Image (cartoon, grey):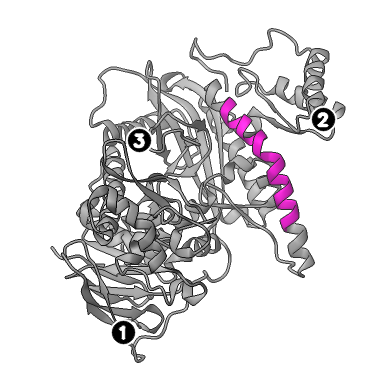
Amino acid sequence: MKSASAWVPDGAVITPLDEDDLLAKVQTLVDKKVEAVAIVFLHAYANPAHEDAALAAIERAFPDLIITASHDVAPEIREYDRTSTTVTNAYVKPLAHTYVDRLVAQTKDLGISAPYFMMLSNGGLTHIAEAKRSPVQLLESGPAAGALVAAHFGSQAGIDNILAFDMGGTTAKLALVDNGEPHVAYHFEAAREKRFAEGSGLPLTISAIELIEIGAGGGSIAHIDAMELLKVGPESAGSEPGPVCYGRGGTNPTVTDADLLLGYLNAGSFAGGSMNIDADAAARAMQPLADKSGLSVIDTARGIYEVVNENMASAARVHIAERGKDPRLYTLLATGGAGPVHAYYVARKLGVRRIICPPAAGVASALGLLIAPARIDRVATVATPLDAINWPDLEAAYRALETDAADVIAETGFDPAAARITRLADMRYVGQGFEVVVTLPAGPYTAESARMMLDAFETSYRQTFSRTPPDVVAEIINIRVSLRADVPGERAEFATGAAGETGGGQTGTRPVRFPENNDFVDTAVYDRARLRPGDSFTGPAVVEEAESTLIIGPGGEARIDDAGNLIVELPQ
């Protein structure tokens, strides 16, 4: 579809491709042992002919090179973002090829003959070849699965608006789920030099469930900074050596060490009893920090817990507000090994009145992989004012994207005829520098569709910016399609005991230091595996399972629903 905007190139060839010069430059790279090459021509989104020719020429001359062309992974306007995405894909492609090929070979050696799927950052599954073609799409696949499973468990509990809070060993992330669906963004920033500073990382034009890093993880290290303030992270003990209490060589006090000293974690049954953790070692590591701060070891641990919770709540509050939302209207759903330990007090700081802790919260992302649909997103740049669109060309462009996505769905082993098709457009007012992604009604589109598109854009624009400018023409920059096909058969679920079985689940008590108390409180401890639908109890309480531990503060009202979710109502 040819653009009507004077400033947008139409892809016309001005200078022919010089293949001899191209191959000479690639030979220089090969001589330097380069394994992968990124091809980025300035306006390849409008006409990919030169990138295709360069790709073919390089493949003929250097068959061992792994090559990425920009129009193959990011066929949209904005040179820098497209280049960043293409180079990132080229960088990880050799590693992805080696890893995936080895994974497939080794699992086949084990006699596993099931088909292979790979999770994408957009929350969908695809086949091995597609993942190897564009591995940059896998970048946020793990956390994306966590957001999917949060939407799933929220739906089970009859709650559609969820704050998906996932806290693991190194970071904590948050995703918004509205009306049962996680938000999907079409630009992502990776490898930020400053963890929470937008613009300090690499911009990538990939579809990804919108996740914001809001804080530290269980392995994040506590320290006193130059202002003599207690800080947590960004340095982390990682999995090796890990927190001091793991006894694997760690020497710096971490969030997990603080959680153990406060009584939130059980040294005797940590990780289902598969490893011993040492509270005395955690206390010894905490002592220098306590001496420097002038606090006791326990008060220092309490300070670490409070600081990390406040940091997460503050970052979450900003992220939610930037999207025009009110956290008090959401339910917080906690996953990850450390998420349930911190969820109750993060929720309190946000003003959230209910939390959900699903079964096996520490490994919930694994279930997200099992319930994920196949999903393929495609994009093309059209860059045309709404009043200058050639409607048959626009409809043809959408159908071409849908056909491409349907082919990948079919190659993944799903029925494209059963796929749900969503059409979107990146729209803005002429003269603006950035777009709003608008979900559009289904096609086909004709000239009569202009009013419908404008209404959809203005509604979305007002939701984002509160008002629309008068007498300014709207334009479509990019068109997008998303195809999703559900996994056939029954959905995977965690097994739960039937309602009416003998429950209760309390295994004893232990002293726990809660933020609102000045001393340890004798606290009921429950075994999650022994709780049954219909069971209820009041905090303070600790609920333990092999993968994680849920902390419920004084006054919290807990119950197990029919799906096995632990629902906690916070005191008003």
- N-terminal-most mark, 1 or 3: 3
470 left or right, relative to 442 = left
Residue 28, x across and y down, in percent = 79, 20
Amino acid type, callout 2: Glu
Quarter of the picture containing the N terminus is: top right
Q: Considering only vertical position in the picture, is 435 above or below 115?
A: above
- Crowding around mark 3 (Cα neighbors within 10 Å: few <14, some 14 to 19, many 20+) is some
Q: Considering only vertical position in the picture, is 290 above or below 487?
A: above
* Residue 34: quarter of image: top right
The residue to which callout 3 is attached is 456
- Crowding around mark 1 (Cα neighbors within 10 Å: few <14, some 14 to 19, many 20+) is some
The residue to which callout 1 is attached is 506
Residue at 24%, 67% (x, y): give it.
513
Residue 337, x across and y down, in percent = 43, 63
Q: Residue 271 magenta-drawn? A: no
Quarter of the picture containing the C terminus is: bottom left
Give the residues in magenta: 83-103
- N-terminal-most mark, 3 or 2: 2
Amino acid type, callout 1: Gln
Residue at 34%, 63% (x, y): give it.
259
- Distance, label 1 to label 3, CA atoms, is 53 Å
Amino acid type, callout 3: Ala
Residue 417, x across and y down, in percent = 60, 54
The residue to which callout 2 is attached is 59
Is residue 158 in sight in this rendering?
no
